[in-house]
Amino acid sequence: MGTKLSLQQHLASSERKLGFVFANRYRVTEFISDTSLSQLYWAEDIHTLDANAQATRSILVIVNPALLQIENFALTLARVLPEFATTLPAVIDSDFTMEGAWFLLALSEGIVLEQQIKPLGRHGFSLIDTLRHAEAILGALRKTPLNSAYGYLEVGSILQTLDKQYLLLNTPIAATLKILSTSNQTKSKLSLSSSFISPEVAMGNKPTEADDTFSLAALIYYMLNGHLPFVLDNSIEAAIKKTIPATVIKLPEHRWQALARALAYKREQRQANPDHLLSDLNNLPVPQPSFLQRYGLALALLALLASAYGFYQWWALNSAQQRSHTLATTDTDTKLAALKVEAQRLAEQQQAEYVEASQKLKDIQQQQVEAEQRLAQLLEQQQQLTQQADLSTAQPTNLANDQQGGLREQRLAELEAQQKQAEEALKALELQEQQTAAKRQLEQEQQAARAAKLASQMAEQQRQKEAAEAKRLAEEAKQRELEKQQAEAKRLEEAQQKEFAKQQAEAEAQRELARQQAEQQRLAEEAQQRELARQQAELAAAQQAEQQRLANRQRQQAEAEARRLAEETQQRELAAKQAAEAQRLANLQKQQAETARQKELQRQAEAKRQEEARKREQKRQSELANLQLAQSTPIQARPQPQNTIATTITVKTSTQPRKMVTETLAVQPSPYPPQLVVKTYGDSESYKEVKWDNTRLFGSVPTSLQEFGNRLCKKSGMGVAIGYHPKALDENAKEIDGGGYLCK
């Protein structure tokens, strides 16, 4: 946008500390409001000055970046903006970049509705002012190109000008979204956070007039209460939570029901259009009180009517005196001033009457509650009396009960008489109220007729005065135009004379200039010829020097090329020598490694042969010892297999037993027990192998356990048992019952 930082970055980094210039032309000066569709700022055009030599003000509208993510939104907005170049307010400039989109509106003064309501706090506007604002906003909506089904009304985008006109600043964006929603390009792709836009439109559906009803109702609620209808929730969140707005105390019950209906979350539950909503709020009949309520309020209403009638008579007398005094005055300006004062006084009086009537209405409502309580008490007493009468009827033998029954009947008769008297009094009050209302209506009609007649007379006088003033101004303008034409003719004549003298002087000057130019041309040609000869000589010398320089340069290049080729040859030879040396070293290292490996293999093979020879010798000695033992021991005296390394038996001879070793192992087990370890192969642990951690700790297998060990090894997939340790440990470091075997 003509600056190092984009407009969005400026606003984000400055935290609304404004005053920077964007697009090399506009200075952002003041924040206005933030809506779900845009952000609004006051901006100054530093290239254009107004009548007071100040930078021209306008309103900067920055489009919500989330809207630019919608397919075809930017393209549609670019096509829509030129259509608003001639509307009010007019779009005077715009731009689309990778960072965002913005446009300027030709407005220099005004205040948005949100800034008017915030200073009032919880008090808000009065009901009369609220309805007046609502009607003006609806009129502004009708003047937009959308006409109806606007859908995107928000308090932060409604501007009131100095002449009390309302303008909708987000209309170009609203028109773009409405075009896209018609083709379902925004459905399920748009989610606007606003308390004034209906849930259907906020979620991308096409707007209808019922959505304008919701928006206008939310605006009316905000103007009356000074806070949002759903507090901190937007319309979508409120619809999900089914939030019920708090009651507006300023509204009577029937008006509040009309406003609450317009705030419904479903279109079919609202009024069909905003006009019906305003009609309901203005013209809904006040619910008729019940007979008992009217009986309780009759005296209060009569007193109120009497005081209002007396006040009206006093006001009518003063108005008649002031009107007669005004009509007697011949000065039209004085009459107009008096009318304005009278209108202002009447407005203040009506406001005071409205406040007084509101207070009296509250008092009447309180009296209604008290009357209902008293009526409930009377009904309860009557019911108790009736019950007692029934009881007394059931026991007629008791004289005291008869007397009490008579008293109750007398009390009921008195209550019925009081009720009849109240009904008659109420009928009389109703008749008197109707007569008073008819009389008051007649007086109001007469007063309205007199006021209309006076207004027409004053308008006619004002029109005549304006016509005379216009005629006088036209004559003055005509006289000024005639004087201007005469002065212009005189000025033209003087200008013609000056122009003729100027032309003669210019002709003489041109002749002198031609002579001087001819002389200068001759001198220039001579100098040019001399300069040409000098340049040719210098060119020849320069060509000769250049040829010599080129020859020297070619010779130097040839020498440098020869040196370069020689150096490259040396480098290639050196590289070949280094490669050969590296290959030789690699071969030498490979030979050394192979020699070491062969020696290691020979050493391992020799150790293996020695180990096998040692084992064969041990096995042979063990078998020999076992054979000798088997031959020298009777079958009945041979020991049973046990899980021990050496077995001792007692052999009885003549008189003295003798303990002797019957089995000697060729290799004794180590005092340190071996342990099973689990080895895992592969990342997935799909293959595991169980092995002994140290096979050298095993001793020879006792002959008595050889067969059992062989069977155990075969079950494990091996052949025979070649080693045994009585205290071998499993993989959990626990001693194996019966010892462990080394299989092969």
Image: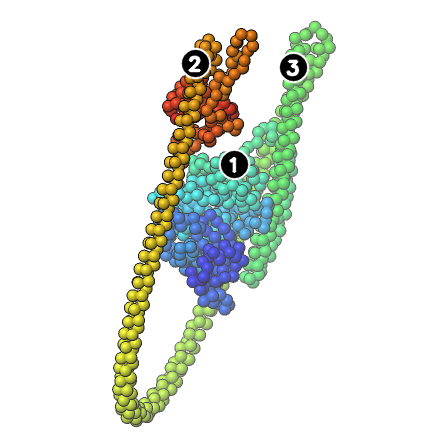
Q: Alpha-carbon distance for marks 2 and 1?
A: 105 Å
On the image, the x and y values in percent for residue 130 come to 53, 46
Task: Tell me the residue at 46%/37% (across/down).
Answer: 265
On the image, the x and y values in percent for residue 411 come to 68, 19
Q: Is mark 3 on a helix, strand or loop?
A: helix
Does residue 510 appear to the left or right of 302 in the view shown?
Answer: left
Task: Identify the mark nearer the N-term, 2 or 1.
Answer: 1
Q: Can residue 312 be seen in the rendering of this structure?
A: no
- Looking at the rendering, which quadrant does residue 292 occupy? top right
Q: Please tell me whether residue 138 is drawn above or below residue 298 in the rendered image.
A: below
Task: Tell me the residue at 50%/45% (across/down).
Answer: 219
Q: Alpha-carbon distance for marks 2 and 3?
A: 127 Å
Q: Is mark 1 on a helix, strand or loop?
A: loop
**Three-letter amino acid code at the position of disc 1:** Thr
Q: Depth check: 633 or 444 in front?
A: 633
Q: Is mark 2 on a helix, strand or loop?
A: helix
Q: Name the residue under label 1.
A: 243
Q: Quadrant of the C terminus?
A: top left
**Three-letter amino acid code at the position of disc 3:** Gln
Q: Residues within 10 Å of mark 1 (few under 14, many from 20)?
A: some
Tell us which disc is closer to us: 2 or 1: 2
Q: Alpha-carbon distance for marks 3 and 1?
A: 47 Å
Q: Which label number is shown at residue 631?
A: 2
Q: Which label number is shown at residue 387?
A: 3
**Dot 2 and dot 3 residues touching (CB under 8 Å):** no
**Three-letter amino acid code at the position of disc 2:** Gln
Task: Identify the mark nearer the N-term, 2 or 3.
Answer: 3
Task: Tell me the residue at 63%/35% (across/down).
Answer: 364
Tell us which disc is closer to us: 2 or 3: 2
| Name of the residue lying farthest toward the right | 400
